[in-house]
Amino acid sequence: MTLVKAVQFSHNSIDYEIKVFSDDMGGYSVKSFLKNGKRANPYNYTVDSDTEFQYEWDKGLPAYEHLIEYAANDIKNDTWRKYFKAVQEE
């Protein structure tokens, strides 16, 4: 996988980096990391090459841009901790 883009932001005084990787088939994978390089959560947002092509054709921007928004919002909304807590309470 090849790094295509990295977006940095801070939330609650913690620095994050969202990275976009391309695969050999023309698809993309988006993952969130802490400043120290460790994963911020286990989520992996992906888009295949056919969907990427159609999205960019229709919207005029790469689909991975939307996935970056999802990844950032999941961090800001504390989605992983909420999920983990809910699973532990079951």
Image: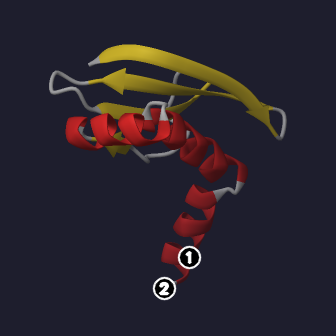
Q: Position of residue 57 (x, y in %)?
A: 37, 35
The answer to whether 17 is drawn above or below residue 46 in the figure is above
Residue at 67 percent across and 56 percent down: it is 78
Farthest residue to the left: give it. 25
Evaluate whether residue 36 shows in this view. no
Query: Compared with residue 34, is residue 77 higher up or lower down, i.e. above or below?
Result: below
Q: Is residue 31 left or right of residue 17?
A: left
Neighbourhood count class around disc 2 (C-alpha, 10 Å): few under 14, some 14–19, many 20 upward: few
Q: Which mark is residue 86?
A: 1
Q: Label 2 amino acid?
A: Glu
Identify the secondary structure beneath mark 2.
Answer: loop
Towards the viewer: 58 or 32 = 58
Q: Locate residue 68, reporting x and y percent.
A: 54, 37
Q: Is residue 33 above or below residue 35?
A: below
Which image quadrant: the N terminus? Answer: top left
- The color scheme shown is secondary structure
Give the residue furthest to the bottom: 90
Amino acid type of the residue tagged 1 in the rendering: Ala
For the residues labelled 1 and 2, say whether their Cβ atoms are less than 8 Å apart.
yes
Q: Dot 1: within a 10 Å radius of its alpha carbon, few (fewer than 14), some, or many (20 or more) residues? A: few
Where is residue 59 drawn, in percent x and y?
Answer: 48, 40
Query: Image quadrant of residue 3?
Result: top left
Coordinates of residue 50 in the picture (x, y in percent): 21, 40
Instruction: Check disc 2 and report the residue beneath it.
Output: 90
